[in-house]
Amino acid sequence: MTVALRKAMAQQEFFQWAEAQDARYEFDGFQPVAMTGGNIGHSRLIRNVNRQLANRLAGSECESLGPDAGVATVGDTVRYPDAVVSCTKPGNQDRLVPNPVVVFEVISPSSVRTGRIVKLREYGAVPTIRRCVIVEPDAAAVTVLSRDGENEPFRAAGLAEGDTLDLPEIGIEISVAAIYEGTGLGETTEGAAL
């Protein structure tokens, strides 16, 4: 049996193709990969992260961008983190964030392996990324992967609701509780059983 091999798409071809699509896609360096839809809780977490970043970075040289801002990782691969911060201003027509420093990924139940393993390896290959923050969808907890130098491996630390996420690379802090505000995760409600 003969199987026809599909020709790899180039990054620029992907960008042109993606603009004509109704759905959202990432690029794995070979072909487009559909990004699955999330749920309301996922959307709230993304909104909270981006709001906290935008408020705290206002007036600084660093800028936070939302889930439509691409990050070039390994080879021609393009990922769209839920939030990304760069201290190098991109142009309005740019498709990729220059020199990303911090990325946030809100884990989606439908893409756990990609979010926790594949993307983290790819982000680790980007020398300018100093911190990856993994936001859990079902509990008020985040995993922080950080490094000091370009060729160093990431170190992992876990944070819970009462903790503060320190982002010294961009000069801000965010409470974990602020990330989960309005989601019902980690919040104590009056009358709830202890």
Image: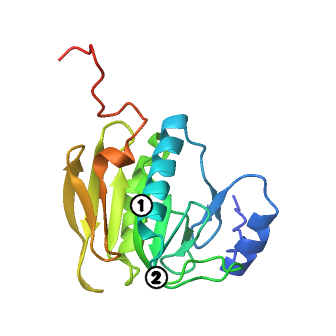
Identify the image quadrant of residue 16. Answer: bottom right
**Amino acid type of disc 1?**
Phe
Left or right of 18? Residue 118 is left
Q: Is mark 1 on a helix, strand or loop?
A: strand
Q: Residues within 10 Å of mark 1 (few under 14, many from 20)?
A: many
- How far apart are the two marked residues, 1 and 2, measured between alpha carbons? 19 Å
Which residue is denoted by mark 2 in the rendering?
A: 61
Q: Compared to 60, does 4 lie above or below?
A: above
Q: What element carries label 2?
A: loop
Q: Compared to 194, does 123 lie above or below?
A: below
* Spot occupied by residue 149 in the image (x, y as percentages of width and height): 25, 85
Instruction: Locate the C terminus and report the quarter of the image it occupies.
Output: top left
* Spot occupied by residue 121 in the image (x, y as percentages of width and height): 37, 69
* Spot occupied by residue 99 in the image (x, y as percentages of width and height): 47, 83
Identify the image quadrant of residue 140. Answer: top left
Q: Compared to 100, does 31 lie above or below?
A: above
Left or right of 97? Residue 171 is left
**Amino acid type of disc 2?**
Glu
**Front in this rendered view, residue 171 or 117:** 171
Left or right of 55? Residue 141 is left
User: Residue 104 shows which numbered tag?
Assistant: 1
Sequence-wise, the earlier of marks 1 and 2 is: 2
